[in-house]
Image (cartoon, rainbow, N blue to C red):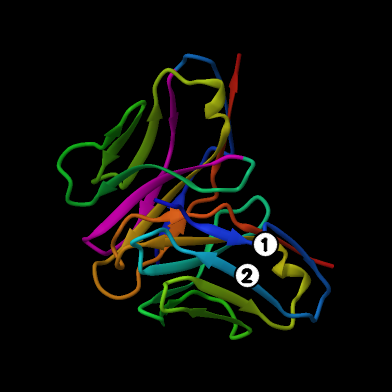
């Protein structure tokens, strides 16, 4: 069975500091995709970054980077130079397979609070 | 291009009633997935519609059903509402079954 584990229920960081949000996953499928989403209090899931299981390099999107360690089944999100607007819930999710119905399996999330 | 639009934004229903939630997919997207997010939890996959047919379902009972229309918009129907159905219901659209997902802002359903 698929599983996503986010071990940090809450994180508190000073503005302008870098922060790492942890995510480990479990799958037996050789082809999968890993996503990070930000969910503000409004409820919308905002896509941040994607890493494919066959990608050789770690994904980066602006201030977001994904530290992908395949052997350890780890996909940590790194936010550089945090901003007050980064305060939100963050979810790691995994999509498996390339055929048939695709679904995202989400972790429990990490609530990130940026302090001024 | 427009994003994913969900309606209504909030809804209060009584236990035993039926509810229909609506989702307009992003322009160019032909696949719609529905997720249920209970308070303090990550979203759980309900089902996915591709080319107007359900092509995958999570661990939800048959009283959760859906439709996809020719314009790729979708509905989620829940019959015989239970208190535990209170949640944020998120719709996500994508192009094909391996494309990136765009989520709507969700419908907050409260069952009393």
Pointer 1 residue: B8
What residue lies at 36% left-to-right and 26% top-to-bottom? A63
Q: Position of residue A56 (x, y in %)?
A: 14, 42
In this rendering, would A96 be left or right of B43?
left
Q: Residue at x 70, y 69 (%)?
A: B85
Quadrant assignment for the C terminus of chain A: top right
Magenta stretch in the rendered image? A18-40
Q: Looking at the figure, which quarter contains the N terminus of chain A? A: bottom left
- Classify mark 1: helix, strand or loop: loop
Residue B84: mark in rendering: none
Residue to which mark 2 is pinned: B21
Give residue A102's quadrant in the image. Answer: bottom left
Q: Position of residue B100 (x, y in %)?
A: 33, 55
Q: Determine the chain carrying the residue at label 1.
A: B
Q: Say which label, 2 or 1, has the lower sequence index.
A: 1
When the figure is inspected, residue B13 is found, relative to residue A50, above or below; the finding is below
Tell me if residue A114 comes above or below residue B75 in the rendering. above
Taking the magenta stretch, the answer to whether it contains residue B57 is no
Residue drawn at x 31%, y 63% is B95
């Amino acid at each position: 069975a698929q599983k996503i584990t986010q071990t940090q229920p809450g994180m508190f960081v000073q503005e302008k500091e870098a922060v790492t949000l942890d995510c480990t996953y479990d799958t037996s499928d050789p082809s999968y995709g890993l996503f990070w989403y930000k969910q503000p209090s409004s409820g919308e899931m905002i896509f941040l970054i994607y890493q494919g299981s066959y990608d050789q390099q770690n994904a980066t999107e602006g201030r977001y980077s994904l530290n992908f360690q395949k052997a350890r089944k780890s996909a940590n999100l790194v936010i550089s130079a945090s901003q007050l607007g980064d305060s939100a819930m963050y979810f790691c999710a995994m999509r498996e397979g390339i055929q048939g119905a695709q679904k995202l399996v989400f972790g429990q999330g990490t609530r990130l609070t940026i302090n001024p | 291009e427009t994003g994913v639009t969900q309606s209504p934004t909030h809804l209060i229903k009584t236990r035993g009633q039926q509810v229909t939630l609506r989702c307009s997919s992003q322009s160019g997207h032909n696949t719609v997935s529905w997720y249920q997010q209970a308070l303090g939890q990550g979203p759980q996959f309900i089902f996915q519609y591709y080319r107007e047919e359900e092509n995958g379902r999570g661990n939800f009972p048959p009283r959760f059903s859906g439709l996809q229309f020719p314009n790729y918009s979708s509905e989620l129907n829940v019959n015989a509402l239970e208190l535990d159905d209170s949640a944020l219901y998120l719709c996500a659209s994508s192009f094909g079954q391996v494309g990136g997902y765009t989520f709507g802002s969700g419908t907050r359903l409260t069952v009393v």
